[in-house]
Image (tube, grey):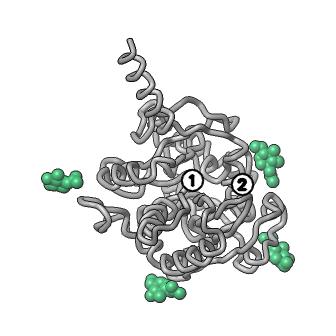
Amino acid sequence: MLRFNQIYIFILAVFAVQCIQYDKAESLNYLFYQKASYCPRNNITNWECGNICKFHPSMKDILVYYNDTHAAQGYLGFDRGQIVITFRGSTRTLTNWIYNFDVKKSPFEKCQNCSIHSGFLKTYNDIKDQLLKNLDNLISKYPAAPIIISGHSLGGAIATIAAIDIQHFLNERSYQNVIKEVHTFGSPRVGNQAFAEYYNQLIPQTARVVNNQDIVPHLPPNKIGYYHVGTEIWLDKEFNQQKDCQPFIEDNSCSKSVKSIVSYSFFDHVNYLGNDTGCKAPFSEVICYLESGIEEGCVDQDLEEIISKARNNKMKLLFLTQEYLQN
Ligand SMILES: *[C@@H]1O[C@H](CO)[C@@H](O)[C@H](O)[C@H]1NC(C)=O
Ligand SMILES: *[C@@H]1O[C@H](CO)[C@@H](O)[C@H](O)[C@H]1NC(C)=O
Ligand SMILES: *[C@@H]1O[C@H](CO)[C@@H](O)[C@H](O)[C@H]1NC(C)=O
Ligand SMILES: CC(=O)N[C@H]1CO[C@H](CO)[C@@H](O)[C@@H]1O
């Protein structure tokens, strides 16, 4: 009897560690931290970015890191007793960026047999030194503060790679700070299965939020050797958690159950929890066209119309930002 109870308590304890409790209000905090990372650098530094910055009025000790080579940007700061670290997504290209830019994997040296998306790795490496130097400064001021890490889209992929580096950095220097949570929105897959397994044992406290039919978490596909990290939090149309997804695996009954490419949604990628994911609404900057070659101007109002047209004709949509087209 006692034995049974002990086993039972053990099982409960294991589940308590593994389960990510999703709290929508807390998720909104992460969303707004990362929204600010898309704003112009001066606005972030001065914490003057309208409603986004006002959402976290006590943010301080802000340090922006960036590198124009692959358009990486993010910041760290101190708010509500925590060190906040965040990375922005791509401003140049959207889903096609994931494919066209170094989708081939590079070895990831921190674990055996691990490899990750070359473009994501390069983008992270561009800002790595600035990030760790700034973090070191902030830790000397807040030596016991928990660390939270977030990012949307490409920023979610960079957050995933950064989290591993930050954990190693904390260990090597015997700092007391712990990574409290990594919280990503619409992250693509980052590396192979060996990488995901290594990540999951190092940083199990990872919520990977996926909005309904968001296209990006389906990329790059499993069939070219990519595998997701963390525990999926799958949201429905009202931005509530649809069900508990199994931790640390790609649960076939969560967003993976959306199988048809024509159901994947770009709109769901740039609107989380009822809020646009960027600094400003992205649609004014987006040109979209149907892959058939017929170009379509695409502004706020008719985006849904164009998407439904693509669905009806089973055509793929590509989205490019103005900035990308000018380059
Ligand atoms: C950035 O800051 C400038 C100057 O304070 C302000 O005019 C502008 O609206 C801000 N931009 C955003 C996106 O908040
Ligand atoms: C790495 O791959 C080799 C060859 O497939 C395998 O023998 C080894 O167990 C793997 N190591 C890990 C840590 O997965
Ligand atoms: C930006 O990235 C490039 C490599 O892509 C690197 O050579 C350069 O040192 C980086 N700049 C800074 C300020 O870290
Ligand atoms: C600033 C902003 O648009 N906030 C909205 C974010 O989404 C929530 C609903 O989830 C709205 O209540 C806010 O108004």
**SS at mark 1?**
strand
Task: Please report the residue visible at 67 percent of the width from the left and 46 percent of the height from the top.
Answer: 305
Expressed as whole percent of the image width and height from the top left, the position of residue 8 reads 42, 21
Q: Nearer the viewer, residue 240 or 213?
A: 240
Which corner quadrant of the image does residue 164 belong to?
bottom left
Q: Is residue 213 above or below residue 177?
A: above
Most extreme residue toward the front is 2
Q: CA distance from mark 1 to mark 2?
A: 25 Å
Q: Three-letter amino acid code at disc 1?
A: Lys
Residue to which mark 1 is pinned: 180
Expressed as whole percent of the image width and height from the top left, the position of residue 166 reads 48, 66
Q: Is mark 2 within 8 Å of ligand 4?
A: yes
Q: Three-letter amino acid code at disc 2?
A: Asp
Residue to which mark 2 is pinned: 276
Q: Is residue 316 above or below residue 35?
A: above
Viewer can see residue 62? yes
Which corner quadrant of the image does residue 286 belong to?
bottom right
**SS at mark 2?**
strand
Expressed as whole percent of the image width and height from the top left, the position of residue 165 reads 44, 67
Q: Nearer the viewer, residue 197 or 320?
A: 197
Q: Nearer the viewer, residue 58 or 316?
A: 58
Mark before the other along the chain sequence, 1 or 2 = 1
Q: How many C-alpha atoms fall within 10 Å of the one at disc 2: few (<14), some, or many (≥20)?
A: some
Which corner quadrant of the image does residue 190 belong to?
bottom left
Task: Please report the residue visible at 72 percent of the width from the left and 57 percent of the height from the top.
Answer: 32
Viewer can see residue 97? no
